[in-house]
């Protein structure tokens, strides 16, 4: 079976140091920090993927409004030079000429927009944010290759990074966006609410045709019964396998998610949807050429 990782990062060590410096955060999220300095390059990623029989991965960059254009272009170049690596682009509500950047990303073959509201500093329900999503939705209505939007969902951001709580993407905020913009496929990273009380995940995140969740990190912060309940609630057609590399290693994550899907009673075909078919569809990868 093919395996595609929907959630990887190529970090610099400054970002890693920032996370590790937050007392208790790495432990609370069960992050694998051992030898992480050796996992911060595309070469290390490709080697790790090959060892675990992972054929493709989606890189998820974000940036502030001032460096956004530079980051998008650098990530596109990196993906083109790295076998099996795809990249998302990123946007910001304060960016001028959002429509022009969407056109550029689309021409470059990018099919996903990654947003991290807490680190980029915007609220999901702000009028400028809604205008950004209006532009994405309008673009999607005119193309055969629409954008999906991945949202980081670290609900502990204000506690550990001192960010404005209004900038956190909560399970409720994610659900409200998906309902408000039905023309966009939304992907809630980390099963829709990293660090959120489980009761909020099941209360606020209900199945929607345009709502997807990725598995990254979630199996380390939810217990097995909770994780399986989320698998049942949203179903195999709306879940994406993800590792959150470099925080987690591919071989262990593939085994872990495979076992949890087996516990949920997923068939081989349903596991295939989670492991690669759903991301294949969102990225517009033709099955016969994947």
Image (cartoon, grey):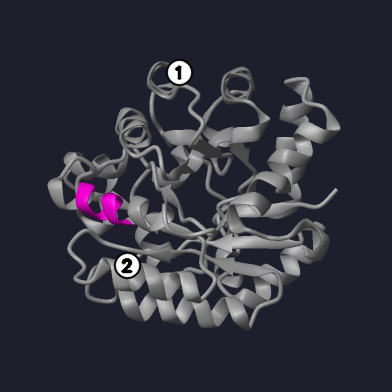
Q: Nearer the viewer, residue 211 or 253?
A: 211
Using the rendered image of the protein, determine whether residue 186 is visible from the camera's viewpoint.
yes
Q: Where is residue 285 in the image (x, y as percent from the top left)?
A: 68, 60
- Looking at the rendered structure, the secondary structure element under dot 2 is loop
Near-viewer residue (212 or 196):
212
Q: Which stretch did the figure color magenta?
A: 130-135
Estimate the spatial distance between the alpha carbons at disc 2 and disc 1, rounded to whole Å: 30 Å
Closer-to-camera residue (79/227): 79
- Side of 39 where 157 appears, left or right: left
Q: Position of residue 231 (x, y in %)?
A: 62, 25
Q: Verify whether residue 238 appears in magenta.
A: no
The percent position of residue 16, horizontal first and vertical second, equals 43, 63
The residue carrying pointer 1 sits among few (fewer than 14), some (14 to 19) or many (20 or more) residues within 10 Å by Cα, namely: some
**Residue placed farthest to the front in the image?**
142
**Residue 63, label in figure:** 2
Q: Main secondary structure of the magenta part?
A: helix
Which residue has dot 1 on it? 202
The structure residue drawn at horizontal position 19% and vertical position 71%, both measured from the top left corner, is 96
Q: Residue furthest left?
A: 127
């Amino acid at each position: 079976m093919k395996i595609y990782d929907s959630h990887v990062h190529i970090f610099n060590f400054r970002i890693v140091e920032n996370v590790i410096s937050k007392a208790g955060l790495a432990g609370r999220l069960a992050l694998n920090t051992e030898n992480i300095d050796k996992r911060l390059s595309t070469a290390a990623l490709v080697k790790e993927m090959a060892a675990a029989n992972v054929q493709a991965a989606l890189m998820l960059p974000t940036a502030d409004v001032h460096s956004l254009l530079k980051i998008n272009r650098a990530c596109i170049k990196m993906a083109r030079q790295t076998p099996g690596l795809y990249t998302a682009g990123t946007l910001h509500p304060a960016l001028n000429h959002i429509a022009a950047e969407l056109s550029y990303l689309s021409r470059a073959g990018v099919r996903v927009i990654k947003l991290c509201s807490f680190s980029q500093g915007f609220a999901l329900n702000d009028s400028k944010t809604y205008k950004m999503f209006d532009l994405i939705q309008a673009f999607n209505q005119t193309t055969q290759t629409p954008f999906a939007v991945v949202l980081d969902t670290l609900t502990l951001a204000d506690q550990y990074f001192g960010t404005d709580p209004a900038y956190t993407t909560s399970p409720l905020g994610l659900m409200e966006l998906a309902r408000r913009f039905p023309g966009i496929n939304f992907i809630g990273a980390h099963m829709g609410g990293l660090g959120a009380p489980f009761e909020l995940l099941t209360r606020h995140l209900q199945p929607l045709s345009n709502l997807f969740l990725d598995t990254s990190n979630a199996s380390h912060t939810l217990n097995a019964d909770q994780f399986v309940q989320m698998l049942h609630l949203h179903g195999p057609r709306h879940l994406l396998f993800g590792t959150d590399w470099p925080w987690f290693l591919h071989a262990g994550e593939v085994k872990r998610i495979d076992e949890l899907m087996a516990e949920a009673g997923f068939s081989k075909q349903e596991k295939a949807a989670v492991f690669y078919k759903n991301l294949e569809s969102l990225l517009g990868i033709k099955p016969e050429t994947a």
